[in-house]
């Protein structure tokens, strides 16, 4: 396929080039001032006390699970409609994911189904702000966590800059995690961040990131740790990207509004909703179509050089590995399964232009016209 409009694209300019060059010339390439500054900037943006930068969102989730004391045999309630890392991070520690079906509009966990999933083995809830949509279930989750003494890990990897009831996404859980893969709102190539307000959890995560050291300068290893560190080059990229946070937010907001305008006249599409209390952070622009049209539309767009993608298909519980390990089958979570057959992510990135969006919208219109 000759790509004319890509699915995603990092927003990189001279600022990132200068930032990386400065680090290269400094000769401090790991565990230096850039990492600390990136962590501090991130904490103040999301309004949390402590941040630990790590080498991926997945590593961040793993450390959050471990540092909060979740362990073999525990159960954690989470969503089957997400990127697989949000469930895999539990399996690393032998924790069993207990899936709950999603609600059709926000695509987050259904708040009305949560309570019935709690058993004596349940030790936590792991919500995901899917596609940058803050979960409407957030309030219910926090209430249940309080009542049943459960840990909450917010997978905020897709939702940097989003907010729920005017509080930033990532400020709710006992720990929250962000990721900086190239298709995310900000990118460092690979990278992630764990946030918490609990000093002990913070110290544990910092130690686990760095081989389980008791503190940075010693060769005293007090627990089984990992090398989940980031380099100073990565941190410098993060700082440069955060410097553009406002611009990135505004541009993505504009792109999403433009899509909503151009696509609103196509009756065959279900567009993303913006419920009260939930300030979307636009990660992808995902629409839904009749399941039997989805692959035809993706192929049709591809013929015009427009990249698009079925997103979170199949659901996590229907991935071969999960079927085999846990015996999940089709029909277990019907809303998530139906949605996963219908979603198409359209080209979406910070610098996408109105002309490009119009071209995508026109192509979809034409393809649907031919399908009817
Ligand atoms: C991107 C993402 C992650 C983390 O991904 P990494 O590639 O490990 O940084 C985790 N959960 C969700 C829902 C994501 O979208």
Image (spheres, rainbow, N blue to C red):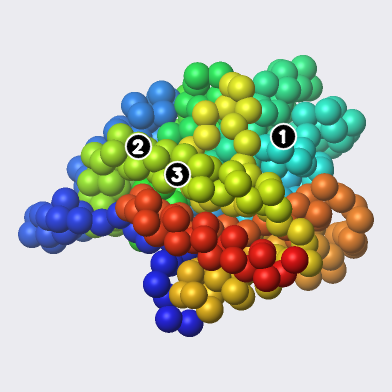
Which of the two labelled residues, at mark 2 and mark 1, occupies the earlier sequence position? 1
Asked if residue 204 shows in the view, the reply is no
Residue 78 in picture, x, y percent from top left: 73, 42
Front residue (pair 93, 38)? 38
For label 2, the crowd category at 10 Å Cα-Cα, with few meaning under 14, some 14 to 19 and many 20 or more, is few
Residue 289 in picture, x, y percent from top left: 71, 56
Circle nearer the viewer, 3 or 2: 3
Q: Quadrant of the C terminus?
A: bottom right
Q: Which residue is mark 3?
A: 258
Which of the two labelled residues, at mark 3 and mark 2, occupies the earlier sequence position? 2
Residue 20 in picture, x, y percent from top left: 18, 57
- Measured in 3D between alpha carbons, the distance from the residue under mark 3 to the one under mark 1, in whole angstroms, is 39 Å
Q: Which residue is mark 2?
A: 250
Residue 342, image quadrant: bottom right
Residue sitting at 42 percent across and 25 percent down?
48
Residue sitting at 89 percent across and 31 percent down?
116
Front residue (pair 362, 148)? 362
Q: Is residue 251 left or right of residue 312?
A: left
Circle nearer the viewer, 3 or 1: 3
Residue 228 in picture, x, y percent from top left: 43, 55
């Amino acid at each position: 396929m000759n790509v004319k409009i890509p699915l995603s694209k990092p927003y990189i300019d001279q600022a990132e080039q200068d930032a990386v060059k400065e680090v290269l010339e400094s000769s401090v390439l790991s565990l230096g001032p850039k990492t600390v500054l990136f962590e501090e900037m991130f904490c103040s943006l999301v309004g949390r006390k402590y941040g630990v930068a790590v080498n991926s969102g997945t590593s961040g989730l793993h450390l959050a699970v471990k540092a909060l004391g979740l362990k073999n045999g525990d159960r954690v309630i989470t969503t089957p409609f997400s990127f697989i890392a949000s469930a895999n991070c539990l399996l690393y520690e032998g924790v069993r994911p207990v899936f709950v079906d999603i609600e059709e509009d926000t695509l987050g966990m259904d708040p009305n189904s949560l309570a019935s999933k709690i058993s004596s083995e349940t030790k936590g809830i792991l919500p995901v702000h899917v596609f940058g949509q803050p979960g409407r279930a957030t309030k219910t989750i926090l209430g249940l966590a309080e009542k049943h003494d459960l840990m909450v890990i917010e997978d905020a990897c897709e939702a940097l800059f989003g907010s729920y009831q005017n509080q930033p996404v990532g400020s709710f859980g006992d720990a929250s995690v962000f990721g900086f893969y190239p298709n995310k709102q900000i990118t460092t190539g690979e990278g992630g961040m764990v946030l918490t307000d609990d000093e002990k959890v913070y110290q544990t995560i910092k130690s686990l990131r760095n081989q389980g050291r008791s503190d940075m300068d010693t060769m005293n290893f007090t627990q089984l740790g990992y090398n989940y560190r980031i380099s100073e080059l990565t941190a410098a990229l993060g700082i440069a990207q955060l410097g553009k946070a406002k611009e990135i937010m505004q541009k993505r907001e504009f792109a999403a509004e433009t899509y909503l305008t151009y696509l609103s006249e196509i009756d065959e599409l279900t567009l993303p909703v913006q419920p009260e209390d939930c300030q979307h952070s636009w990660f992808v622009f995902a629409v839904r179509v009749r399941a039997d049209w989805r692959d035809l539309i993706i192929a049709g767009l591809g013929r015009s050089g427009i990249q698009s993608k079925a997103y979170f298909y199949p659901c996590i519980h229907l991935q071969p590995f999960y079927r085999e390990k846990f015996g999940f089958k089709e029909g277990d979570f019907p809303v998530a399964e139906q949605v996963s057959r219908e979603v198409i992510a359209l080209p979406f990135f910070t610098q996408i232009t109105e002309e490009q969006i119009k071209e995508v919208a026109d192509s979809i219109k034409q393809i649907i016209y031919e399908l009817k």
